[in-house]
Amino acid sequence: METIQIESSLFEGYSIALPKSTLLLIRGRRGVLGCGYFRVETADRTGDALAVVTGVKSCEEMLAAEVRQVSAAAAALGVRPGISGREALLLMG
């Protein structure tokens, strides 16, 4: 786990090595930013706020990446496709 600071907000970043890739997640108080392994459909079933970025290999890359998909709960917080992972995290802070 690594602590990620964006402006005055703190987030928890997780990187789990898999045999052929890496599972990435950054957790905020109200939602998470995940890599392409995470499914919006699952987050919608559970009511979790999730924004998904793809093509990333580190938590740092996730911040600059464009959000591709969002769950309904994330959308309710103002997260939308096209914004950066950094912007999404600030909204889910």
Image (cartoon, helix red, strand yellow):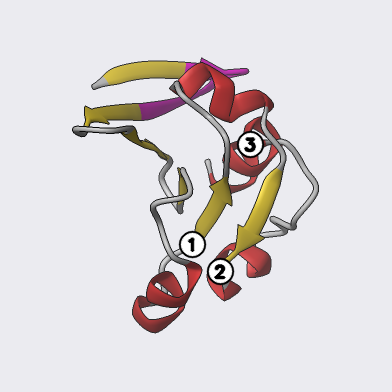
Q: Counting residues from the N terminus, which is met first, the one under dot 3 or under dot 2?
A: 2
| Image marks 1 and 2: residues in contact by CB distance under 8 Å | yes
Camera-nearest label, 1 or 2: 2
Residue stretch rendered in magenta on the structure: 5-12
Q: Kindly identify which residue carries mark 2.
A: 71
Identify the residue shown where x is 41% and y is 45%.
29
Disc marking residue 49: 1
Q: Is residue 89 shown left or right of residue 47?
A: right
Q: Main secondary structure of the magenta part?
A: strand
- Disc 2 marks a residue whose amino acid type is Ser
> Residues at badges 3 and 2 in contact (C-beta under 8 Å)?
no
Q: CA distance from mark 3 to mark 2?
A: 14 Å
On the image, the x and y values in percent for residue 28 come to: 43, 41
User: CA gap, disc 1 to disc 3?
Assistant: 13 Å
State the image quarter where residue 71 is shown.
bottom right
- Mark 3 or mark 1, which is nearer the start of the sequence? 1
Which residue is more in the foreground, 34 or 88?
Answer: 34
Q: Which residue is mark 3?
A: 85
Tag 1: amino acid: Ala
Badges 1 and 3: C-beta atoms under 8 Å apart? no
**How crowded is the residue under tag 2: few (<14 C-alpha within 10 Å), some, or many (20+)?**
many
Q: Earlier in the sequence, mark 1 or mark 2?
A: 1
Locate residue 19: give its quadrant: top left
